Amino acid sequence: VDDAEDSATSDDSPSDTSPSADTPRKANATLLMLARNSELEKAAQSVRELEEKFNFRFNYPWIFLNEVEFSDEFKANMTELASGQVTFGVIPSDHWYQPEWIDEERATEGRNRLVEADVIYGGSVSYRNMCRFNSGFFYRHPLLQQYKWYWRVEPDVHFYCYVDNDPFLYMEEHNKTYGFTISLYEFEATIPTLWQTVKNFTTEYPQFVAENNAMGFLSEDGGESYNLCHFWSNFEIADMDFWRGEAYTKFFEYLDATGGFYYERWGDAPVHSIAASLFLPKERVHFFDEIGYFHNPFTHCTINWDLWHNKGCTCSSWMSFDYQQYSCKRRWDLVL
Ligand code: GDP
Ligand code: MN
């Protein structure tokens, strides 16, 4: 797969990121989308909106990843819509597919259990591949090596407000590592043994747990049990050096070795969220109130009127998920 990459550069893409009088400073960052060829229309919608609301001014590069080669049509459409450099990468197969050492009988039982419990994607192997890839592999892809920051964008999302301050530079200048817009409760049936595995890990590696961590976001009883709160990872603006660092690398390997991504249906959202909440001081996690965002079925829209007005938001604040019943934003407010 080394040569299965393809790059297209539009004429106006900035070729250097060094500061000068007329080019504003840029972060070492990329926009990142994992997508299937069948999602062309939905991917185009997300790219079009993020370009219109943000990237037309900043021209950050886009990277698209897929476990199979993107179609010429997909490539042509995304290249047309993007203002920055666009690159299409194929995911190495050992970063995507179910590993040989997984006990297929046990994995099948796990899937059947979740299908019977009517859990979303309960029977899907490809969904599990995706969750494991997003948990432990995307930041190792050759195309991402040169970058520190990424903004994860999914097909079929909406952006409702103008993003005129560079969020990557905000993260950099305020010493942030992980940024989110929506937080909520996970389906317990997808992660029955995840918390016990996390507790085993932190017992074995107490040195990775940050002193001023956000355990209060994850647990109501000081870490005994998990309250299922997590940051919704379909939106992330974060520092890949955190995922590449020792704590998270060991953490992912430890989780992966249990087979839980396949025997259960561990999502990258709880995995990322638990790591960010425990291995970072809580101030390093940032809530992007000013970024209006929709991923089915939830919206984040600031309830701060000045912000809503200043950023030209087109969403309705009363629809914002922040303080709805299944949101974890209240917990987050308590922790900070
Ligand atoms: P949901 O948000 O949990 O409902 O899951 P999605 O279907 O939106 O998938 C999450 C992300 O992974 C999206 O960016 C999808 O395009 C991507 N994705 C999911 N499954 C696959 C797959 O089998 N192949 C590829 N290439 N991308 C996938
Ligand atoms: Mn999605």
Image (cartoon, rainbow, N blue to C red):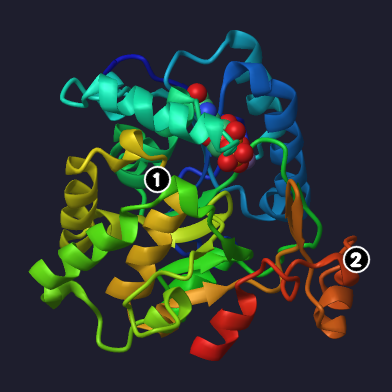
* Dot 2 amino acid type: Ser
Quarter of the image where one finds residue 288: bottom right
Measuring 68% from the left and 74% from the top, which residue is drawn there? 289
Crowdedness near tag 1: few (<14), some (14–19) or many (≥20) residues, C-alpha within 10 Å: many
The residues bearing labels 1 and 2 have C-alpha atoms spaced at a distance of: 32 Å
Q: Is residue 117 left or right of residue 211?
A: right
| Disc 2 target residue | 316
* Dot 1 amino acid type: Trp
Measuring 67% from the left and 50% from the top, which residue is drawn there? 55
In this view, the residue in front, 22 or 162, is 162
The percent position of residue 278, horizontal first and vertical second, equals 31, 74
Measuring 60% from the left and 36% from the top, which residue is drawn there? 118
From this view, report whether residue 203 is shown above or below residue 186: below
Query: In this rendering, does residue 96 appear at all?
Result: no
Q: Is residue 205 left or right of residue 236?
A: left
Quarter of the image where one finds residue 312: bottom right
Q: In the image, which disc is placed on residue 266?
A: 1
Instruction: Name which of mark 1 and mark 2 comes first in the sequence.
Output: 1
Question: Is the N terminus in the top left, top right, bottom left or bottom right quadrant?
Answer: top left
From this view, report whether residue 98 is shown above or below residue 292: above
CB at mark 2 closer than 8 A to ligand 2? Answer: no
Marks 1/2 in contact by CB < 8 Å: the verdict is no
Image quarter for ligand 2: top right
